[in-house]
Image (tube, helix red, strand yellow):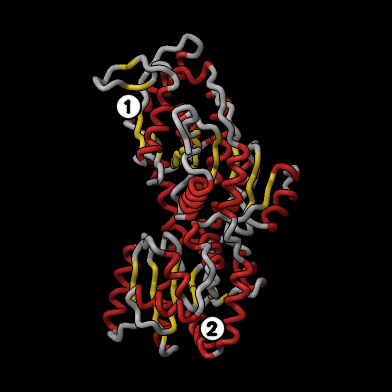
Amino acid sequence: MASPEQPPLPLLFLIGDTGGGHRSAAAAVQQALERALPGRFAPVTWDPLRGPDVPGLLRWFAGLYGLCIRLTPWLWWSFWRTSNSRLGLRVLRRTIMAPVYGSVERAVEACRPGLIVAFHPMTADPAVRARTITGVQAPVITVVTDLVTAHLSWVDAAVDRVVVSSEAVASECAGNGTPPGRYVPLGLPVAAEFCRPPLDEAQRRALKLELGLRGEFLVVLTGGAEGSGRLRQGAAAILRQVADVDVVVICGRNRSLRRRVSRLAERTGDGRLTAQGFVGNMADWLRCADIVVGKAGPGTIAEATCCGAPLVLTSFVPGQEKGNAEFVTAAGAGVYAPRPRHLAAEVGRLRRDPAALAAMRDASARAGRPGAAVDIARFIADLAEPVPIGPAAEPVGATGLTGGDGESADWPSELLPALMAETSTLGRPLVFALTDVEDADHPARASSSLRRLRRSGVLIRAALRDR
């Protein structure tokens, strides 16, 4: 537990809300850190692609990801393939993604982290550059959240370590010339609630009843945070061709999909179909499911295998999800059924063959890596050490905090760590802002960055878990 003598060490977690996997991975590692070393670290999660201090054009562009993978996956594939080269990546970073560098630099200046973790590929190189510019002597690591096929941006930045999700990604790193000691295969982190031992049949039935279902054979359809993968067509095919099954569709943020599935449930009228939006108890749905259906997203696969759930995969996002379906089928943890009629046929076959379903469930449990988040948390804890505050940190510590009357207060440099320690004790979020300061060593850069922070009204939130 942290104390005023040893305040929590700030960590900067860089994500991008393009899909839900990057934020989920960061949250899982933060949860594991807090459970293993309570009060020792104060992670700050920051989104430099869609945060409030980036230009509206970049926020709009990043927000197109969900629509693109649902409606025009070929367009996403063209963008992914074009940027998956050193020339294409250089052009992307200097044009569309250029504001990410400024956002990350301002975040590093604000919280002076002891370690920076990039959970999104477009944040790794900006983190390295921000470390150089700000003078923060913190290690920078990347946690790859793609399962089999990794974009070049995951591994080309000059970070200190790359945590890879599988041996396939480790092989890609080796093929790209990454030194062997620089990448570490620790798995894809998922939250602790997905990592409990799989349930037996009686326990699954009891959990279904708790969730308001009939307790029958349950098929859960999920398309990740964006609700992609033709879930409505798949649900309709299952209801037409397979009797005595309950179907639950987890629609994520896709409100249009939820409305369409709800209308289908009303027309069906037998209570077999249920539509859910973005749920906070996803682990419960996966743990009680007899079959999980969805696109081959890395987060869905990692969570389902940790729960020991059999998988029927219906689609994949071209580019980063290529190879995920082969990974699942090769492990015996699921099958690939790209068309609704094939999906219904596979569900019917598994419904009638309990032995095959049980074998698939066992293979799914073997393919999971429930200890990945804990392993990554320990890895981060070993790398993160308190960093001496140098001259570059003076704008933040010495005169960079705003007093209660709105004027700059001459507070001591150790005040921020002390505040974070007190916040950790109370279990409340810490919110702080920066004001302009004068620094004879580098007034132009510090003053400009801090003015931009103040004008944009950005508040860096150290979201500490309730204790």
Q: Which residue is mark 1?
A: 455
Residue farthest to the top, as pictured: 440
Of the pair 220 and 18, the residue shown nearer to us: 220
Q: Residue at x 47, y 61 (%)?
A: 193
Q: Residue at x 46, y 70 (%)?
A: 286
Disc 1 marks a residue whose amino acid type is Arg
Please tell me how crowded label 1 is: few (under 14), some (14-19), or many (20+) other residues with Cα within 10 Å: few
First along the sequence among labels 1 and 2: 2
Q: Which residue is mark 2?
A: 346
Residue 77 x/y as whole percent: 55, 57
**Does residue 231 appear left or right of residue 454 in this picture?**
right
Of the pair 240 and 465, the residue shown nearer to us: 465
Q: Residue at x 60, y 58 (%)?
A: 147
Specify the quadrant of the image occupied by residue 365. Answer: bottom right
Q: Can residue 89 be spotted in the picture? A: no
Of the pair 123 and 215, the residue shown nearer to us: 215
Q: Residue at x 62, y 39 (%)?
A: 382
Disc 2 marks a residue whose amino acid type is Glu
Residue 222 x/y as whole percent: 44, 68
Please tell me how crowded label 2 is: few (under 14), some (14-19), or many (20+) other residues with Cα within 10 Å: some
Specify the quadrant of the image occupied by residue 405. Answer: top left
Residue 329 x/y as whole percent: 63, 73
